Amino acid sequence: MSNADDRVTARHTLIVIGLVLATAFALAFVYATRRVLVWVVVAAFFAVALKPLVDRLQGRLVRRRALATLLVFLAAFVLVALLAALILVPLFGELGRFADRAPDLLHDARAGRGPLGQLLERTGARRYVSEHSDQLRDLGTRLRQPAVGVLRGVVETVAGLVTVVVLAYLMVLEAPRITRRLLAAAGDGQGDRLRRVGREVSRTVTGYLTGNLLISVICGLLTYVVLALTGVPFAAVIALLVAVTDLIPLVGATLGAVIAAGAGFLHSPTAGIVVLVFFVVYQQVENHLLQPLILSRAVRLNPLTVLVSVLLAAELAGLLGALLAIPAAGIVQTLLREYGPRRLRPAPPAGPETRSRRPAGPAPQG
């Protein structure tokens, strides 16, 4: 009896050791390939968002899947290129004019004249610069040294973008074939459930993108109104740039505030203060009101779930976590609804079909 118990204990010990080693190996593998895994996750996100457009184009106009996918990706690329042109061309022109005026502005700033010189004089920055000019010159010299590292980072970023685009293209192109194989392997009963889960996941990602774009449009329009009222030049270009940065959850409005407030302070201190106060108020409204309400309706999530998921994901995974938190929460809710225990499944959203299926109550008497 004791020998049998010893064999059982040894077997259980080996199983526990094997599980611990397998978990450690899996974590080490994920850490070693984290960059590639991030590329795959981002590519899958865009593939799920663009797949409905490809399916619609293939069903109505183009029969070949490869051609429909290529046309949709080209249209997306052209749209991104147009937005970049609308932002960068005026921005480069303004930077050129600023470079021409830079010597005069620097001379006025050193003398304490002009808006920038008065701002430096009020804040005491001009005295600090004159007292620590040698240290600032050494700092500038040190900042020029990591140019190779910056160039390497730019090359890696471009390579990552190209890889994400190629992965997303292949995912959309091979989606019907992969879906057919999964449904065939799952059988009829599980196949219907997988189709339902796939539709819900696609609707969640599409709703997230639509809601995020709506919030960015609101931010861009309000920014344009504030900049136009304060007389800041190139208000439309700056507002468009702010709307693009606002696509990033939580920190997007902060980046837009830095850009718009910087342009406002260059115009006048009063305009800069007004723009800064506007963004301080707007960021709180967007993070705690617009995002939970709009995205909860688009993704069909509770506003509290939206806010908590974004905060937790941003703390755990940084910018990428903030970008993918809301669709990930929607996907988890869909999986719980389909595969979770019946008592833990969230209630389905009350749509027209749900309301029509409710049993009618007893007819009123009398």
Image (spheres, rainbow, N blue to C red):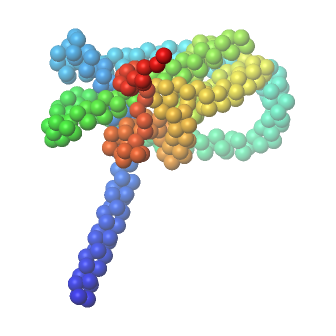
Q: Residue at x 49, y 26 (%)?
A: 297
Locate residue 164, reporting x and y percent: 34, 34
How many marks the image carries: the answer is 0
Q: Is residue 149 above or below residue 246?
A: below
Closer to us: 127 or 133: 127
**In the figure, residue 350 lies in which quadrant?**
top left
Residue 207 visible in the picture = no
In the image, 321 versus 180, the foreground residue is: 180
In the image: residue 258, left or right of residue 306? right
Q: Relative to 138, is 294 above or below?
A: above
> In the current view of this chain or complex, which residue is farthest to the bottom?
2
Give the percent coordinates (x, y) of residue 177: 17, 32
Residue 252 percent across, percent down from the top left: 57, 30
In front of the other: 10 or 351: 351
Question: 333 above or below 105?
Answer: below
Side of 91 relative to 334 (left or right): right
Q: Position of residue 351 (x, y in %)?
A: 41, 23
Residue visible at 36% across and 47% down in the picture: 341
| Quadrant in which residue 274 is drawn | top right
Residue sitting at the far front: 366
Instruction: Answer with left or right where residue 118 lies relative to residue 173.
Output: right
Judge left or right: residue 51 versus residue 90. left
Question: Which residue is at 84% across, 30% downward?
Answer: 121
